[in-house]
């Protein structure tokens, strides 16, 4: 479902290059990953709450004039200081964290913690030291790989045995997360190209 939702928001040119994003479909895709993350237990609550607030606020700006803000390129015509730009930035940073974490959980066999590792690669550089410390502690409490597989967040068919669910996740999660990361990185690239990128910490 995540793969389908993120593909639906893509705008590609004749060569197949991703060049823009349809925002109505993008909000739907973001809401799906917010819902998936919310099923991973209380350890993810801080990030889920942040994602939910940023999604609602960014979409509210879009809803003010959906005809003129139907795509990312149109949305980025807003001034850099506009609250909608800030909320979209933080929404996508949170999305990148979840997608990188998901990819690590189902592609890496190291003894490290995939949630903490994903956080260190994505969100951590935008956080102050106190928030970094708090989130790392919380993320270490995320469920194990098998517990995540068994949750309602990743696999819709709840009556499948664990080994079948694990097989589905290992097959589909890396593909879906890689596709979605491409969309998120386009947001970052277009923000930088239009001077809308902001490196300030939370």
Image (cartoon, grey):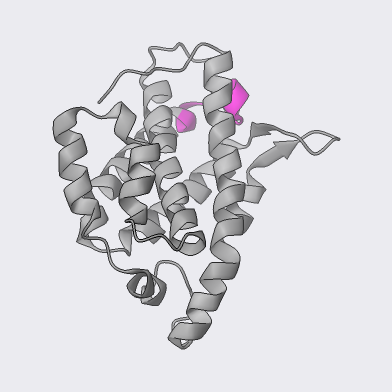
Q: Which of 133 and 32 is in front in this view?
A: 133
Whether residue 120 is visible: yes
Q: Nearer the viewer, residue 119 or 155?
A: 119
Q: Nearer the viewer, residue 201 or 187?
A: 201
Q: Is residue 126 above or below residue 29?
A: above
Q: Which of the 4 image quadrants contains residue 182?
A: top right
Q: Give the range drawn in magenta.
A: 62-74
Q: Which of 138 and 109 is in front in this view?
A: 109
- Quarter of the image with the N terminus in it: bottom right
Which residue lies most toward the right here?
14
Residue 103, percent from left and from top: 49, 55
- Asked if residue 175 lies left or right of residue 64, the reply is right
Residue 135, percent from left and from top: 21, 44
Residue 179, percent from left and from top: 62, 48
- Asked if residue 84 lies left or right of residue 179, the reply is left
Q: Which of the 4 image quadrants contains residue 143?
A: bottom left
- Asked if residue 58 lies left or right of residue 26, the reply is left
The residue depicted at 28 percent of the width and 46 percent of the height is 47
Q: Does the magenta stretch include residue 69?
A: yes
Q: Is residue 64 magenta?
A: yes
Q: In this view, does 154 lie above or below 25?
A: below
The residue depicted at 22 percent of the width and 46 percent of the height is 136
């Amino acid at each position: 479902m995540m793969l389908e939702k993120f593909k639906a928001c893509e705008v590609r040119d004749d060569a197949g290059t991703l060049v823009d994003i349809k925002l109505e479909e993008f909000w739907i895709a973001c809401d799906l990953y917010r819902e998936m993350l919310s099923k991973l237990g209380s350890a993810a609550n801080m990030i889920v709450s942040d994602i939910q607030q940023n999604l609602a606020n960014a979409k509210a700006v879009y809803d003010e004039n959906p005809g003129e803000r139907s795509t990312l390129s149109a949305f980025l015509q807003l001034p850099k200081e506009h609250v909608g730009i800030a909320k979209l930035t933080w929404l996508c940073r949170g999305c990148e964290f979840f997608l990188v974490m998901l990819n690590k959980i189902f592609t890496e066999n190291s003894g490290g913690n995939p949630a903490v590792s994903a956080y260190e690669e994505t969100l951590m550089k935008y956080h102050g030291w106190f928030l970094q410390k708090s989130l790392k502690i919380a993320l270490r409490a995320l469920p194990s790989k098998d517990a995540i597989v068994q949750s309602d967040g990743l696999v819709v068919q709840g009556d499948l045995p664990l080994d079948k669910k694990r097989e589905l996740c290992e097959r589909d999660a890396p593909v879906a997360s890689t596709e979605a990361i491409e969309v998120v990185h386009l947001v970052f690239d277009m923000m930088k190209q239009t001077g809308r990128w902001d490196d300030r910490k939370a």
